[in-house]
Amino acid sequence: MLGKRVGVIGGGQLAWMMAGAAQKLGIDLIVQTPKKDDPAVALSDEVILAAINDANATAKLAQICDVITFENEFINLEALKKIAAQRTCFRPHLEALEPLLDKYKQRCYLQKIGLAVPKFKLLNERSNIEFEFDFPVVIKARRHGYDGRGTFIIKNQAELEEFWQQKSSESMLVEEFIPFAKELAVIAARGVRGEVVVYPVVETQQEEQVCHRVIVPAKVTPEVTAEVEKIATHLLNKLEVVGVFGIELFLSKEGKVLVNEIAPRTHNSGHYTLDACEISQFEMHLRAVAGLPLPSPKLNCSGAVMVNLLGYEHSEEDYSEKRQKLAQIPQTKVHWYGKTESRPGRKMGHVTILVGDRGLSEEQALANNIEFIWYGRSPLPQSRQN
Ligand code: ADP
């Protein structure tokens, strides 16, 4: 095996979920993460307590690992390049991350390799975007956005004025709003021999730009599924990467697939793979970066729903009562990340329900039930509750 000791930049829930797979594969996991109560710390073989973008800490990590990978992309790429020059093996490699970490550069790259993306441009100070884009229009921070933070959907001229008044000096991009029929996502992995495996295409359901639910598999035509698989394979081959990538897409009302965003790591839309697939995205990622063969990413059931448990208050509670109630639902697995502090919108855990072939309305009803127990109400508007 090439990578017996795998270093992970980031010690949040993604590294935490990787830890179970590492144990199964006999891999040592060493994380670089800022706080000693970060989720992955307790399960890691060693820890370097340092900020994600602390390249000196990554240099130390490099000395004790065979290969370094990422659970978080808020890194200092330029500083890491100096470490890579000392023969440190990063998977995915740093040149592949170069066009992906900045949302504007990412859009340019995707367009360059022939993938369809929403119409976009760089946002200049006070530019007359209302002449080039219809409302609603979408404005995004180029870096450090996540869970919808840094993404603004501007509905009219008044909101645009308000946006200009509050805008900081950070660089942003503007793009057309896609009135999508569905949002889709897919997890794909590429191994050291160039083989690509693609997980089932899923539907993601967002509220206020934050993912609440994932429906597995997405109810789409075989043509759409094939198109998404083609996009994923093309992208990973063009980047020549090793590891798991999450790809988020829009399915337009006319059936066209556009790429929204690439995550160069394991992704929330693939958490269902822990319970509903023969190989989880976390094991697949470790297999890829350790140079092991990639097995087929098949479902082990006919379908599933994943519901995120998002924080809805400031609290240090561990919500054990609610978690017990959720765990009592048949065919349900609760994953609790062990974060010591809850904040509104913070990902605290997730629930996967294996649902079989029961149709979308039943899947929505099961998800509604989970959300009702967790939030004490459903966070979805009435129109989405059936
Ligand atoms: P983040 O990186 O924070 O997840 P995204 O760019 O993926 O941000 O946007 C979050 C959500 O905002 C998307 O899942 C989608 O629901 C909505 N969104 C983003 N861009 C567009 C767009 N161009 N058209 C319509 N909705 C969009």
Image (cartoon, helix red, strand yellow):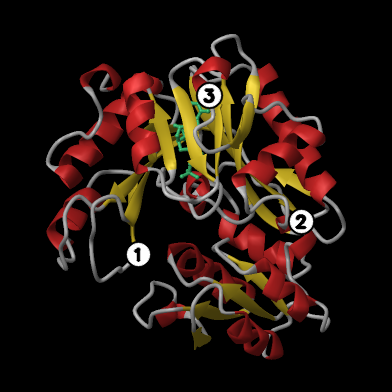
In the displayed structure image, the side of residue 11 where residue 382 appears, left or right: left
- SS category of the residue bearing label 3: helix
Q: Nearer the viewer, mark 1 or mark 2?
A: 2
At label 2, the amino acid type is: Ala
How crowded is the residue under tag 2: few (<14 C-alpha within 10 Å), some, or many (20+)? Answer: some
Q: Residue 96 carries which label?
A: 2
Residue indicated by mark 1: 337
Q: Is residue 319 above or below residue 123?
A: below
Q: How far apart are marks 1 and 2 (CA)?
A: 29 Å
Q: Name the residue under label 3.
A: 129
Circle 1 crowding by C-alpha within 10 Å: few under 14, some 14–19, many from 20:
some
Q: Position of residue 13 (x, y in %)?
A: 43, 64
Residue 356 location (% of width, % of height): 43, 31
* Amino acid found under the numbered disc labelled 3: Ile
Q: Earlier in the sequence, mark 3 or mark 1?
A: 3
Q: Say above or below: 255 vs 376.
A: above
- The disc labelled 1 sits on which kind of residue? Tyr
Q: In which quarter of the image is residue 2?
A: bottom right
